Every structure is written in C-alpha cells, then in structure tokens.
Image: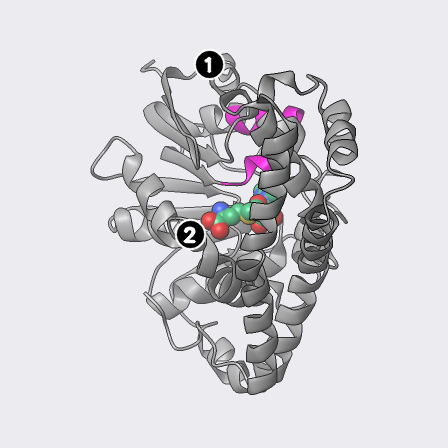
Amino acid sequence: MTTPFQDPKLRQRGRASVDFLAGMAAASGPVRARVDAAIAEKVASPDALPEDLDERLAHMDALLADSPAYPVQQLLGDWHGRMHGRISAEAFEEVEGDLAPLFEAAEQGPATLRLDPDLKAPDYWDGVHFHRTTGGWEGHTHMGYIHGEIIHKKLVGRFFPGGIFQQRRDVAAMAPRESYRRILDMGCSSGHFTTALAETYPNAQIVGVDLSARMLEHAWRTANANGWNWQLSQQAAEATDFENESFDLVASYIILHEMPAHAICAVFAEAFRLLEPGGDMIMSDVTRYADMDRLAVWKADRGAMFGGEPHWRESASLDLEQVAREAGFVDVTTKGPYPYVIQGRKPEA
Ligand SMILES: C[S@@+](CC[C@H](N)C(=O)[O-])C[C@H]1O[C@@H](n2cnc3c(N)ncnc32)[C@H](O)[C@@H]1O
C-alpha cells in the first residue's frame, strides 16, 4: 500500500537527475554486452580462472586491459555508486518542505519506536558508507525516506529483475505456516520486508530491529500511516533485549551480506534463542558464491566492490546451512539462487 507521504512527486530538477541516473543504468546494457563478448573471447571456461579471488580480480583486469568497453563499464559503475545517494538526497531536499506536514502526521499512530542514543553499534557497521552513500545508513537526517522512497522506488526498483517488492512478498509467503502470532524482522531498515510480512500475516504482532535510527524512523512513519502497530527498536540483530522464546517467526531480508561471518553466526544464534520451540526461521540474502561459477563470482565480487559492500565476499562465501544447523535449527532447507532463502525450525523442547 502507498500512503500520501510515500512516493513523493519530485520537482523537475530532482526528477530529471534521478531519471538520468536510472537511464544510465539501463543504457549501460550495451557496454556490458561488449565486455561480456570480450570475456567470451578470452575465457575458455570459468574453471580456467584462478581459484583465489584476489588473483582472479587481477587476472581479469589484465585480460580485459585492451577492451575499450571495460574501463567505460568501470567508470559508469563508479559514478553510479558515488552519485546515487547524493542525487537522491538533493531530489528529496527540493520537496522536503512539501513533505514536512505529512511526516508530522505520520508520527501519530499505533506504531512504537524505541531509539537508543547510547547504542554502541558494531565496528563492521559504524561509520561504514554502505552502498557508497556518504555517511552510510545514517548519512542524512531523512536517509530512511531517501533510501526507502527515492533510491528503492525510483531507482533500484525500476531495473531490478523480478521486482524488489514482489521478491519480498514471495519470501514472506515462503514461511511454512498460514499465520503467526509474533514476528521479528531483523534488519527491518525502512520497512519494505516488514510491510510484506505485515501484509502476508495481518494478524501477527510485527516487531522490527535495525541499527539505523534514520531507517527506523521511516519504517515507523510508514507503519503509522498504514495504521499498523509495529514495535520498532534500535538494536543489533545479534544482541537484542527480547526475552527467550518471544517469537514464533524470526525473519530477515538481505541483511546478512552487510555483516562479517562472526556476526552472521551470532544472528542465527540470536534467532534460535528468540524463537519458541517449534518456531520458524526464514532468512534471505544474496546468491552464495558456492552456487556460482568462477566467472559469475568474479562479476558479483567486482560489483560488490563498486557498490560499497565491504562484507559481501565474506558473507557470500559462508555456508549458511551449516551456520543454521550449528545454531541448533533442524529441517534446514535452502532455495536459490536469488534471493537465497534459508529456512529452519527450532526443535520442540
Ligand atoms: C539492505 S538493508 C535491509 C533491507 C530490508 N530488510 C528491506 O527489506 O528493505 C540492510 C539493513 O540492515 C541493517 N543492519 C545491518 N547490520 C545489522 C545488525 N547487526 N543489526 C540490525 N540491523 C542491521 C542496516 O542498518 C540496514 O538498515
């Protein structure tokens, strides 16, 4: 559902800049095709590429050194990475005044927001400029809105295969039961997967945690504007203050690739602690490197480098099935390739 304060009408300048950025992403297709053609000429088989990923990156750079399209592709990726946050923030600032009364109205409602100004965020998150957005998740007073409504809906959502919101609804619907009582969304961010959970399980109490106050503020306004009684709080997913066994479903959508391996293991352990016996876990993330050939891994790894994803490689290299089993989950199943969805159940006591 889209409420009046969502989906802003951008001014001409902001709209043109955002459209230019989206158009540039679409127009880079032919450049990519030329790079792919050069690769097809030079790489006999993905298996022939070096096993070590750093070596593979250097090897591919050397191999493609005489391809005129390759530096252009790098330039476009680099520019897009650097500029998308800034362009989206500037487009927002042009309409900020129009939105202010709608923001204020969305601060009334049934949802609750608990921020923790004393929270010591983990080093792997704190000060990291994820997606190369200046300041990362906290880079603007209204970063939640900028990310959720402009970057996601007016940029990424326009060219993401399968639709970024449909994917969230599909993952929410994969949980095994028809209904749940209390659902935790770990890393709820600006509330897009949380919305899918709320719409799929309308009778459940929805609870969301995230490290980012700015993201949570937007999720909170979205919930209020829709009349949803979400309980949101600023906490690390791996160390929440909820009591043992307080949920029957613990879920997450595409947060794990923003964490190093030790934090991912801690997230699964926390999910296990928080579930009641028989409760369900469903986590989704990017395609595992183990499920890709060496060429596809090189592309993903290079994309993550340009895209400001410092933990992607470590996370995508992890065997999440093993992590889930070690945390205590049973009946562990996975489905890929993207999003990679892993499910499990906490055994009955
Ligand atoms: C890619 S976004 C998640 C997307 C979101 N689930 C959705 O559907 O749009 C990653 C989010 O995870 C949050 N995050 C990263 N590490 C976290 C942690 N350890 N605990 C809680 N939130 C975390 C970030 O602050 C960010 O808001």
Q: Amino acid at mark 2?
A: Ile
| Residue 264 shown in magenta | yes
Crowd rating for badge 2 (residues with CA inside 10 Å; few <14, some 14–19, many 20+): some
Q: Which residue does the image show at 71% across and 54% down from the upper left? A: 72
User: Which residue is outermost to the front?
Assistant: 41
| Disc 2 element | helix
Quadrant position of residue 49: top right
Q: Quick check: 200 left or right of 233?
A: left
Instruction: Please tell me whether residue 54 is drawn above or below residue 207 in the rendered image.
Output: above
Crowd rating for badge 1 (residues with CA inside 10 Å; few <14, some 14–19, many 20+): some
Query: How is this picture coloured?
Result: one colour
Name the quarter where the C terminus is drawn.
top left
In this view of the protein, which residue sits in the foreground, 318 or 32?
A: 32
In this view of the protein, which residue sits in the foreground, 211 or 181?
A: 211
Q: Which residue is mark 1?
A: 325
Residue 196 in view? yes
By secondary structure, the bulk of the magenta-drawn segment is best described as: helix
Instruction: Determine whether the beta carbon of the residue marked 2 sits less than 8 angstroms from the nearest atom of ligand 1.
Output: yes
Instruction: Please tell me whether residue 176 is drawn above or below residue 180 in the rendered image.
Output: above
In this view of the protein, which residue sits in the foreground, 199 or 146?
A: 146
Instruction: Specify start and end residues of the magenta stretch as a single range.
Output: 254-268
Choose the circle earlier in sequence order: 2 or 1: 2
Relative image position of residue 206 (x, y in whole percent): 37, 48
In this view of the protein, which residue sits in the foreground, 106 or 261?
A: 261
Q: Which residue does the image show at 59% across and 36% down from the upper left? A: 257
Relative image position of residue 37 (x, y in whole percent): 58, 40
Q: Which residue is mark 2?
A: 164
